[in-house]
Amino acid sequence: MTTLDDLLTPRSVALVGASDDPTRIGGRPLAFFKNLGYEGKIFPVNPNRDKVQGIDAYPSLADINDEIDFVLVAVPAKGVLDVMRQAIDKRAKTVMIFSSGFGEMSDEGQVMQDELSRLSRESGVRVIGPNCLGVFNSAINFYPTFTSTIERRQPNPGGLAIASQSGAYGSHIFYLADQRGIDMTYWITTGNECDVHVAEAIKLLAEKEDVHAICAYAESIKDGDMLVEGLEIARANRKPVVLMKVGRSAVGAEAASSHTASLAGDDKVYDAVLKQAGCYRANTTEEALDICYAARPRIYPAGRRIGLVTVSGGGGVLMADAAEDHGLDVAAMPADAQAIMKELVPFAAARNPVDVTAQFFNDMTLVPKFTKLMLEQGNYDALIGFWTSVAGSPRISPHLRAGLTEAMQGHDRKLFIQSLIAPPEICKEYEDDGFPCFEDPSRAVATMAALMHFGIAFDQGRAPTPDVPKLPALPDGGLGEKQAKAILADFGLPMVQDVLATTAQGAVAAAANDGGPVALKIASADILHKTEVGGVELGVSGDADVSASFERIMANAAKGAPNANIDGVIVSPMVADGIDCILGSKLDPVFGPIVMFGLGGIFTEIMGDVSLRRAPISEATALEMIDELKGRALFEGARGAKPIDKTMIAKAISQLSVFAAAHADTAESIEMNPLRVLDDRCIALDALIVKKGAEEH
């Protein structure tokens, strides 16, 4: 099994295409090796020179009479495969390829890239790239990269690690993180990912003890299973993973594909799966680095109850609004604690936000007194303080820091973020005392919400999943509604009982047995969207009307889908009014079967009120899906209605997720729509199973 040390802790490195010019792509890493303290052996390879940057050079890898752990390739694309074969012969562990001109450029380039993948797979030599900007391990001063950011300042080893599919943007993130004073040991760019990809990089980083937080940038994920595995390892090790997954828009997805020769995938599925695995998806670089910066104390509040303390009533209101926007609980202080605060400062606002007012200038002891009351009696999971420029005063900041530190004694597992304006050297003093600092209080609140997300995810751990049984294969050929219902019902899913009629007389007899109004629907595996061909009529009663309805539906189907094979007409009883929902699954190309639940009708079509999870899921996770819906109040007795037992819905969601996982190789999508929820039961009125490769009509 490959470890990060296998990739980034080499004892020797060969640079094929080494340049004597330290400003060129093939010269920069060699200059870094020479000048920044790398202690391993260095072998420049250049057939045209005896020495490169003063170091003995070799015509080829084959001419090096020594072991080589790491081969860096900076030659034109047409020469890369030959270098790869030589590296395999030299039993190198890692080959990293700067060269572009592969899958991102042309079909011919993709053929070469595929051959690199084959050689890597068959030889066991790991490949980073092609078309990548490099990696580094600052703990051993190993900088096989041509990024110019290293020239500005050599990074200090630290707990942050960066994994980026894009080299240039990965370099951008690294430089901004360095400017924020965030130290990092590992930086990995994966480029076209013919072998090592960003999901594996996350997994390898999650396994390293000296990595405390991971910031990742991805345009696509090539191995959904490995990404989830890596995220779950990070969660188990209490390491936050902040992922910037771009390609959310149609234009962005197209750009991502052209950039790295990969597919961007379904964005809503990414959102759901990342959240399910405890990851935080950041939309901006600023947001991602805010979180990584505030993660340095490695304190992750395991709840959403926030205490706000301020010297400005206006600042307190702003933070309270932001907290509500992020779903935080700005709970009031207990009445007796408020009374104590009022005794100290009669004109203070003691509820939450707590405003110590400008009296703070006259009595510096107010901060520890108020803050201790919030910590000890407010039962808050974390605090945010807003001090504006007051906290940056050289005269006041030592007293404020002392007061904050005093208040935090005995509460070292609670996080206290400060919003203040101060020179960098004073900010660093707060940071050294364990207080992350933000000028903008709204950013402080947003960052705290993200850290709380991690704290809750870490405490919850990986959600248990039900076992997936081995089920009989789906029948050959297309599946009509009647077959789909029978298969799902056999698995225990709630289905309406109906009859397939092949004649008008049969439809009349079936309706008579039901004893009330019925629904009639065309039955054909070739017609998935029945209403579009006039194949559905509802609330039909009486022998004459049922017979006429049967004939109309058959005629409409013959006209609207003349090539379809017609089985007949399904006759179903009309089920009492209830809450119509949609329950289904789809096969995602990255993550496999994804289960979906939402409110039906306009809620699905216009509002998109649905929740997604990677299958299979437990009933407990299914309950979380229900509670995520905007319209969840409908199940809780809105407008005086009787509350619905959500556990029966959760059971159906979990069962369908297991069924979808069991048929992940053959079922493209499964749908129970509508799933009607009544007081005492839920029941699917229609069902659909689309097999892989089936054409929709």
Image (tube, rainbow, N blue to C red):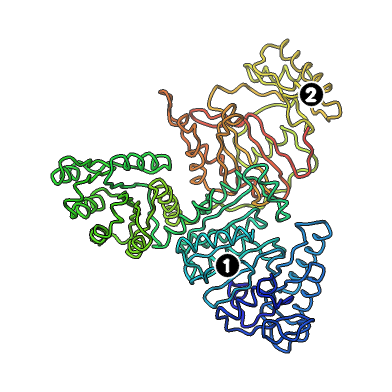
Tell me: residue 116, above or below residue 388.
below
Q: Which residue is found at the position 60% from the left and 33% from the top?
A: 582
Mark 1 sits on what residue? Answer: 204
Tell me: residue 134, above or below residue 631.
below
- The label shown at residue 154 is none
| 121 with respect to 350 (left or right) | right
Mark 2 sits on what residue? Answer: 502
- At mark 1, the secondary structure is helix
- Observer-nearest of 28 and 512: 28
- Regarding residue 185, the answer to whether it shows in the image is yes
Locate the C terminus by quadrant.
top right
- Observer-nearest of 643 and 399: 399
Residue 475 rendering spot, x and y as whole percentages? 76, 43
| Residue type, mark 1 in image | Leu
| 540 with respect to 370 (left or right) | right
Tell me: residue 271, above or below residue 392.
above
Locate the N terminus by quadrant.
bottom right
Residue 273 rendering spot, x and y as whole percentages? 57, 50
For disc 1, the neighbor class at 10 Å (few under 14, some 14 to 19, many from 20) is some
